[in-house]
Amino acid sequence: MDEIDSRILRELQHDFPLSERPYEVVAERLQISTKQLWARVQRMLDEGVIRRMGASFDSNKLGFSSTLAAVSVEPELVERAAKVIGQFHEVTHNYLRNDAFNIWFTLIAVDEKRIESVLEEIRTTLSLEKAAVLNLPVKRLFKLDARFDVSK
Amino acid sequence: MEYQISDIDKRILAALQGGFARSQTPYKDAAKQAGIPTEQLLAVLKDWKDHGKLRRIGSIVHHEKVGFSGGAMVAWLVDPEHVERVGTTLAGFKEVSHAYERRTAENWPYNVYTMVHGTDMQAVKKTVERMSETSAVSDYRILNTERELKKVPPTYIMNDPRCTMLDARTSRNSSIENPGSSIEKEEEQVC
């Protein structure tokens, strides 16, 4: 990554233009050619520096429900739990973490009822006690800004 | 009043939920997939942006690869009276990307959650200490990521036109009644 890559990443994380040829607008802002911008974006996608280009939505405002959930499973059950949990398309992120509640995952579903039934299905499939599953929906949002200050 | 998602909205979501195609005309391509004119797609996105339904368009970066290899979720135990002040204070740290108040459980009293990033775990820990001092909250748990088990963009609408996420409830009823076979069923299902 060089200085031009950093400038591109900073620019792409903010206000991607709503126009038919958005990369032309970005290239103009950065005062580089569209060809150069496009080649570098493709390279960063190939390298995985950019996971993807696209839109992030507010699921709740679009009418969907979401939550953060956690389960507490024995270490030898982690692989199976990861598989069981990951198979639901409603599960978007899932992490192994260092706590008694060791598997933490986010769900986006059509409504709260569906979230509860997914969690219940996970619980019964893994033979967990009710207390071993946490359902922690958001009550208040203070900040959501997953942009990174790419300095160099 | 519950927001009812329209057919056009569903088609737009289906076209955009997995990210842009590798194309210099991503909206044109998405519009084609949704079966609507590009102008209409752009107008809907503008409207969603204005109403907060669309958070952001742009690059989703791999934070470890842009120099932020440290990251942790931190759960804070905050006196309910002070949630507003503490939440706002914690959200004010530039190292914090997400800050929420969440529901608690009987056996899990932590009510405020932050995602904290840094160049490495040492930097993250230092930031968390500063956050604790500034907010005067001493009871917290740093939940380090040991492994990423899944990370995908949300699937709002199933790609198969015969079933959308809205149909998922009915299509899974059988496996809910019979949880032991849920995994096998999951793989067989179209939805």
Image: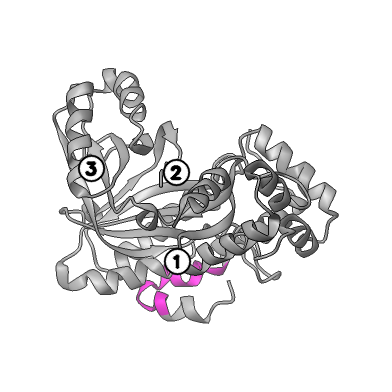
Q: Residue at x 20, y 29 (%)?
A: B130
Bounds of the magenta segment: B171-183
Where is residue B145 drawn, in percent x and y?
Answer: 25, 56
Residue under disc 2 on the same chain as residue under disc 3: no
Examine the image and state in which quarter residue B162 appears.
Answer: bottom right
Where is residue B119 drawn, in percent x and y?
Answer: 28, 48
Q: Which residue is mark 2?
A: A146
Q: Secondary structure at mark 1?
A: loop
Q: Are marks 2 and 3 in contact (CB under 8 Å)?
A: no
Q: Residue at x 59, y 76 (%)?
A: B190
- The residue under label 3 is which amino acid type? Val
**Number of numbered discs on residues:** 3
- B112 or A130: nearer the viewer: B112
Q: Residues within 10 Å of mark 2 (few under 14, many from 20)?
A: some
- The residue under label 1 is which amino acid type? Phe
Q: Which mark is residue A32?
A: none
Q: Which residue is mark 3?
A: B124
Q: Which residue is mark 1?
A: A88
Q: Is residue B31 left or right of residue A79?
A: right
Of label 1 and label 2, which has the lower sequence position? 1
Q: Residues within 10 Å of mark 3 (few under 14, many from 20)?
A: many
Specify the principal SS of the magenta part. helix
Q: Is residue B116 above or below residue A86?
A: above
Residue B184 on the magenta segment: no
Q: Is residue B27 left or right of residue A138?
A: right
Of the residues tagged 1 and 2, which is closer to the observer?
2
- Quarter of the image where the N terminus of chain A is located: bottom left
Disc 1 chain ID? A
Q: Secondary structure at mark 3?
A: helix
- The residue under label 2 is which amino acid type? Ala
